[in-house]
Image (cartoon, coloured by chain):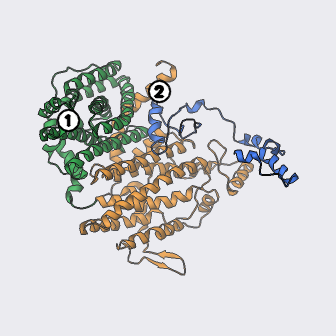
Amino acid sequence: MPETTPVVAEDPEALADFTARVRAGEQIEAGEWMPEEYRFEALRLINMHANSEIMGALPEREWIPRAPSLARKMALTAKVQDEVGHGMLLYRVAETLGRSRDEMIAELVAGRARFHNVFHYPAETWADVAIIQVFVDGAAMQTQGALRSCSYAPYSRVLKRICYEEDFHIQLGLDVWRALAEGTPRQRAMLQDALCRWWTPIMHFFGMPDRVSPHTEKMLAWRIKVKSNEELRQQFLRKFVPIILEYGLDVPDPNLRWVEDEQRYVYTEPDWEELRRVGRNGGPKSAERLALRQRFHAQHAWVREAMSRWRAARADGAVA
Amino acid sequence: MPDARAAIADPAVRAAYREWLLRIADDELVIGHRHSEWTGFGPDIESDVAMSSIAQEELGHGRAWYEQIAADDGGDVDRLAFGRAPREYRHAALLEQENDGWEYSIVRLVLYEAFEVARLRLVAASGHEPAAGLAQTLSREERYHGLFADTWLTRLAGAPDGLERVQAALDRAWPDALGLFESTAADDVLRRAGVLPSSPGALRETWVDTVRPVLEQCGLAVPPSAGAREGGRRGVHTAAFEPLLVQLTEVWKSDPEARW
Amino acid sequence: MQGRHRDAHVHAGDVHAPDAEMALVLAKENYTRRDPCVNLWVVRADQIHATTRPAAEMFVPATDKSYRFGGSYRQQRRVLQSSYKASYRDEDQ
């Protein structure tokens, strides 16, 4: 999909009406008139969210075969299943904005689409499962929780279910986290190590502090964006730093501290260049994970073909 | 039929019964593990989700059977699932084979589910509690597994080059599937003691009667009834099992005393 | 999907599937993993007929329609006969 916003001359009356409705807190349904730029931005956001769920299944699924108890194995399978299911729901929403799922998946598999930065990193030990479930899902929960009040109704509806399930993931993750944090010294060390490795990607997760630009203003006015990147990052830190401290683990940033006067955390500025690189599918695991997706996509080409022939035969009434 | 409970008082019968339950538990654990490998990689998103549920349920069934065994042994469920040597596992070869394509996994699911339903019915009919009650409960979930498998099989085999692929998968899976019915001395002990109302041989006839029409309706040729790959029920496994077990137990074995 | 017997079916979502039979099989695990369900319906998306969005307006009453609601009569009674005991109709409900 093109990276730049389309320039379309919109009907000024329709545009004004649309903007007024959105400003008044109304939501837009699938199939209603919307400015091309709105469609483009909403689609870009939702398509990337869908991609991220599908790619986000990969780091954790590596630990399904190795989960250390039957209960953990079932719960982790169910958790990854939810992520895949979110992908399904989100691609459906994206489809209402004009792209087919097949097209979006083909683009993702070909490495031409983007997905969230955190899913470009390795999941090296069992403790990574805890970090992903608590902190990555916790971070996602801030963004998605805010977007429940976005202006596109089908997205907003689906986010309600997604957030409900993400909450289960965080609880599940906290249970794994607790077992490790209160476990043997080796288990604790594993957890601390995973936390250190994931800290930067998680700080990156919310993106760079927003520039004050007409584009950001418009996204906020149209409620395709609901809170600023920095607001979401602060919201996340307020909820999740206490969990680290409660279990006596070290926050991986020595400069992180709460500033009472400003009611915010200050932290070491992460390397934003790394985020840009990772975002362009240049992360440590981007190529490997895309190659895996490609392998299965190619392996299943005949299955997809078989299903579409079956569908066509049914539609013709050729198969009873 | 002699009273099952009284029969179980005999240590030899008791051991044979444990052996039998362990087969069920191990079958479910190993197939659940294989199915779970599809999570994230299904041929379409909806089926990925559905197959994942099936994996979770098979693992859950495995755990329920291990619980019954562990309750008798006084042991721990995870130790039973993760802490044995390869030769101590009692599942059949069919369940440990790698997922060699979606069509293979679907064929395996069709063959295994038909067997599992028949086996659960046998256990339920034994009247020996608590196993009979558990078998009754678990069959509820197997129904969907069978439905999912049959629905997919029909559609895969209905494709122009699908039939050939599915037939190849079936030919590959068949000898291993026949190995599900492998009988050991334990079966004789249980039958003589009247713990089980019928033999694995009878189970096999029921199974063939179930799968034959399903396969033939898809235009598939049912492979010959000879050449069962046995050994699984005696702890002799194929090359596919060891890597599976290494992966399955990797984290647990790094510290079996730890709480994970 | 129908949550319990005798409940009305409610829309849960959609799936991609090659036919209705497969759609039912897939809908079960995609939409009823956590919520209780006793029955599913599927229908092809292109077989759904809907009113248009702008038509929402025609559903909004333009005049007072409170005469259609029992509550408004109870209210009137309360105003007219202050001694009127709590309506038997309320007790029914």
Disc 1 with disc 2 on a shared chain: no
Chain corresponding to green in the figure: B
Q: Is residue A163 above or below residue B33?
A: below
Q: Residue C92 carries which label?
A: none
Q: Name the residue under label 2.
A: A311
* Image marks 1 and 2: residues in contact by CB distance under 8 Å: no
Crowdedness of circle 2 by 10 Å Cα count: few (<14), some, many (20+)?
some
Q: Mark 1 points at which residue?
A: B92
What chain does badge 2 belong to? A
| Residue at position x 15%, y 37% in the image | B13
Residue B166 appears in the rendering: yes
Please state which amino acid type lies under the numbered disc 1: Ala
Query: Residue C22 at what x, y percent from top left?
Result: 45, 30
**Seen in the image, is A198 located left or right of residue B229?**
right
Query: Residue A178 at what x, y percent from top left?
Result: 35, 64
Query: Residue A172 at what x, y percent from top left?
Result: 39, 57
Local secondary structure at mark 1? loop
Give whichever of A276, B98 is nearer the camera. Answer: B98
The colour chain C appears in is: blue
| Residue at position x 13%, y 37% in the image | B234
Chain corresponding to orange in the figure: A
Query: Residue B189 at what x, y percent from top left?
Result: 13, 33
